[in-house]
Image: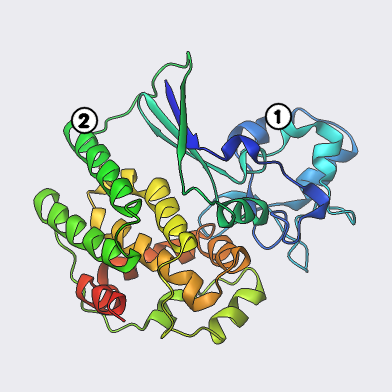
Amino acid sequence: MKIVTPAFYKDFKCIAGDCPDSCCQGWEVDADSDSLKYYESLTGGIKNRIDSVLSSDEYGNTVFRLTSNKRCPFLNDDNLCDMHIALGQEHTPYTCRTFPRFINDFGSLREIGLSFSCPVAADMMFGLKDGFAFSQEINSDLPVLNDIDAGLYYRLLTARNDIYNLLDSSSTPLNERLSELLDFCARLQREIGEVPNESEAVTVYEVLDNPERINPQYGEKLENADFSALLLNNVFSQTVAKYLVFRYFLNAVYDRDVLSRAKLAVLGAFLPSWLGNDAWSVHLWSKETEHSDLNMERLWHNLKHAECLSVDSLKEMLKK
């Protein structure tokens, strides 16, 4: 299997209790089936403690119920995990073992990235000086079985490489590159699937104003956002756009919606201008948006149907 990661991926190291915005607070963690099976085999105090905080969310998932101040019930006063200490990292839930990594499997290709929702990963991406590059290696793992449309997959893979080259073309202003990206994906969308109806009256503020709040600082950032500011000719905006293309674009193989993913990349490029040209601002957006099923479902809907995120509307913003 071919493994593709960002070039900086192997330099990541969790800072645990020193983290300024712990991944163990603000959101509920799913207890995956393998972990639950292991917890059933336990006895004594740790099992009783685990059983006492298991609950079901609105989607029917088994989760660890947060404390009243929205901390994981195993996060101690030193911001360290009591379950990790008692059982070892290998027996913490899958989400905890893998965060802030995201993993996308496409048969013989596995892509692993780091999310902006982690402050350390966000700082790493903010500090990139040579662009968002990739590393790859081949291991002995067998391909993951799937029912992917091979023709569509290779078409999207080629299209994404074209998008990478377009975003990396520093001889052209970033606003022009992003406008070309929208046109390129609009053409591709017409060729491979239904073009969305972009007619719902929603403002950009409303798009970003998530119904599920995780960190109140995000709300403060949004209240003070200047949507007239567009400082797009900088490396960080390009990095955010490329991160979003890497993370989401190939998943269009499952729903044929490439245009929403192109719009998401452009929206991401705007974030440093609107919320603050720093790693922390994009971290806050990512933690609240990319890790909430409710917020992401709403975002995908708006990317497909909101008039303010239509190709024409985004291209008008890129002209400012």
- Residue 300 located left or right of residue 8: left
On the image, the x and y values in percent for residue 198 come to 21, 73
Q: Quadrant of the N terminus?
A: top left
Q: Position of residue 193 (x, y in %)?
A: 14, 52
**Is residue 10 found left or right of 150 in the rendered image?**
right
In front: mark 2 or mark 1?
2
Q: What is the quadrant of residue 38 in the picture?
A: top right
Q: Is residue 229 above or below residue 60?
A: below
The structure residue drawn at horizontal position 47% and vertical position 13%, both measured from the top left corner, is 140
Residue type at mark 2 is: Ala
Compared to residue 220, the image places residue 18 above or below, namely above
Residue 217 shows in this picture: yes
Return the residue at label 1. 38
Disc on the earlier residue, 2 or 1: 1
Q: Which mark is residue 150?
A: 2
Q: Which amino acid, by three-letter code, is at mark 1?
A: Tyr
Q: How is the image coloured?
A: rainbow
Residue at 18 percent of width and 70 percent of height: 197
Q: Nearer the viewer, residue 120 or 97?
A: 120
Locate residue 84, reporting x and y percent: 80, 38
Side (left or right) of 194 relative to 288? left
User: Label 2, label 1: how many angstroms apart (C-alpha)?
Assistant: 37 Å
Q: Indicate the secondary structure of the residue bearing disc 1.
A: helix
Which is more toward the observer, 317 or 174?
174
Q: Which mark is on residue 9?
A: none
Which residue lies at the image location 85% right of the left edge and 44% below the top edge? 82
Q: Residue furthest top?
A: 140
Q: Is residue 116 visible?
A: no
Where the C terminus falls, by quadrant? bottom left
Secondary structure of residue under mark 2:
helix
